[in-house]
Image (cartoon, grey):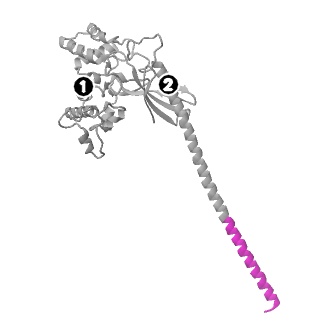
Amino acid sequence: MTEQKRYVMRKQLASFREGRVQGSILILTLWTLLMLSTFAIITSVTVRQKLTLATRINERGKLRSIAEAGVKKAITMIIPGEDEFIEYTSLGEYWFDTEAVFKKMPIGDGFCEISYVDRDIVSNELITRFGFVDEERKININIEDDIILRQLLRDGLGFDKIEAQEIAAAIVDWRDEDSQLSIPLGSAEDREYRSGAFAYEAKDAPFQVFDELYLVKGVNKDVVDIIKNYVTIYGNGKINANTASREVFYGLGLDKSIIDKIMTFRFGEDGVPGTADDGIFTNPSSIVPQLSQRTHLSPSELAKISIVADQKLKTHSQIFKIQCRAFLANQKIKMDVTCVADRKGKILFWREN
């Protein structure tokens, strides 16, 4: 092999080796860039997730502040002044349904609304009212016996006779201190609850939160959705005659003729609650006389309404449920707060969603 050929081969070999080195460097560079890019993407996603979380935490804090402020503002509206004496509570007051006061109340970086769903007296359709719910217009499941609960379910809310009897008995047996069934079949005590899919016992104490009803035999979401506007766990058991619904009056054992006369008195000539011509029962002792002056009561009706008024009715409410929905300014994010408070400003229940 000539010297010239050796030189050419050495040059080719050197060129090949240099190409391999450059290729290795290129591959290493590409891998390095790929790793850096992957790291950058991961870091970017992590940072973005943390920023999103921080933003959501900040938004939740703002929403909670708005909701708290809205509820506290609402509570101040039901606290009487030092020299103010409230003799009666009626549907003609601002707390019942005043859109101008409770819709889009501006607070901080957003606004809130105090509202609830109610059944319209005239159309019987569900409507949104802007205001509070009077908890003392309802039947107290911690106090009333199975007879009144059964009458509410059967006569007021249209439950089947057997189902109404069983649910009413189960509610009473859940809270009473004994372990004896109120009725032979259909109710439940410790033995029946222990044998269920999830073993537990009857509470044998008053309901502390409304959602405890879901633990009672025969009570499911469908039942709760029907009864939730007519029963409560708050108050002393007496019901406000100025705010109670037809369904609740049926629960108290009044028949249709008496209930019609009460509602006609309360709603005035226009038949609409919360208007200027409403009749108002001013105090418990005046319920029967006021009703008798406005309409004729037969001896049997007079006897019945007198007993119910004396034992079960009052004219003033102390406890209200406030449902507040808070929004940020963009209206895309919201928070719901449900609060039960009394006229002294004491909060009895608070739940955020």
Residue 100 in view in this figure:
no
Q: Percent from the top left, x then y, of residue 268?
A: 33, 13
Q: Is residue 313 visible?
A: yes
User: Label 2: how many residues lie within 10 Å, few (<14), some (14-19) or many (20+)?
Assistant: some
From this view, report whether residue 231 is shown above or below residue 3: above
- Badge 1 marks a residue whose secondary structure is helix
Say if 113 sits above or below 214 in the image. above
Can you say which quadrant of the picture contains the N terminus?
Answer: bottom right
Q: Which residues are magenta?
A: 1-30
Residue marked by disc 1: 148
Magenta region includes residue 261: no
| Amino acid at pointer 2 | Lys
Residue 277 placement: quadrant: top left
Marks 1,2: beta carbons within 8 A: no
Q: Main secondary structure of the magenta part?
A: helix
Residue extending farthest to the top is 293
* Amino acid beneath label 1: Ile
Residue 348 in the image: state x and y as whole percent. 42, 27
Percent across and percent down for residue 116 are: 41, 27
Q: Is residue 248 depicted above or below 264 in this figure?
A: below
Asked which quadrant contains residue 221, the reply is top left
Depth check, front residue: 7 or 201: 201
Q: Which mark is residue 161?
A: none
Q: Residue visible at 27% across and 44% down?
A: 194
Q: From mark 1 to mark 2, how far is it between C-alphas?
A: 35 Å
Q: Quadrant of the C terminus?
A: top left
The relative height of residue 194 versus residue 319 in the rendered view (above or below) is below
10 or 148: nearer the eye?
A: 148
Q: Is residue 187 left or right of residue 7?
A: left
Q: Which residue is mark 2?
A: 72
